[in-house]
Amino acid sequence: MELTAMISSCSIDYTRILYTKDNVKKEENYIPRKANYGEVKFFYKLKRLAPPIVAALLALSPISSPPVSSAQTLEIQRGATLFHQSCIGCHDAGGNIIQPGATLFTEDLLRNGVDTEEAIYNVTYYGKGRMPGFGKECKPRGQCTFGARLEDEDIKVLAEFVKSRADQGWPTIQK
């Protein structure tokens, strides 16, 4: 849409340049004017940009991906923020620097019986093994974090974020 607007706003009729051979046959009186070097250069740059622009439009179109509401986007961002504040020290990119078999990858979550949002919530709230609990009512005290505790709603959002990232596959490198 914008591409056609850009093309139509130019002083050159590119459709005539592209189809000069056909136009000569159809329009006997038409003599194409000679395009200057800058116009031709612009046309070729525009031609090279067309495939990435079309790919971007397709990737962002509602046909190729389910619609995400602004509330869902805010929840995802909130989950990512909570993860970066409380979890990334041990679970960078879904891994586990303290206990390698307890990553946040789907296969490890399944093997350890922590493959649902509820199970992830419980482990995050109460802790398990070497992982401290972050819940306000976490007990016993030695199993809980010495740092800031999280509200129940925050742990729920965090569990949803971790589950969705596990389902989508964690990135190999996180910046």
Image: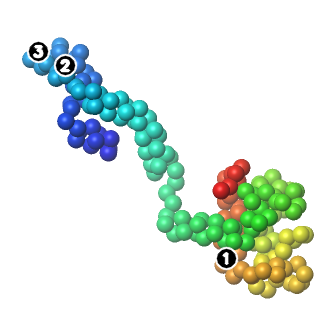
| Mark 3 to mark 2 CA distance (whole Å) | 8 Å
Residue 118 visible, this orientation = no
Residue 24: quarter of image: top left
Residue 126: quarter of image: bottom right
- Label 3 amino acid? Glu
Count up the numbered dots. Answer: 3
What's the residue at 51%, 60% (across, down)?
A: 68
Residue 9, position as x, y percentages in the image: 22, 41
Residue 92 visible, this orientation = yes
Position of residue 31 in the picture relative to residue 41 (left or right): left
The secondary structure type at the circle numbered 2 is helix
First in sequence, mark 3 or 2: give its number.
2
Question: In the displayed image of the protein, which residue is found farthest to the left?
Answer: 29
Query: Mark number for residue 28?
Result: 3
The secondary structure type at the circle numbered 3 is loop
For this rendering, which residue is in front, 120 or 99?
Answer: 99
The reply to whether callout 3 and callout 2 are in contact (CB within 8 Å) is no
Query: Mark number for residue 121?
Result: none
Query: Mark number for residue 23?
Result: 2
Residue 1, position as x, y percentages in the image: 32, 44
Residue 106, position as x, y percentages in the image: 77, 54
> Eyeballing the image, is 135 above or below 16?
below
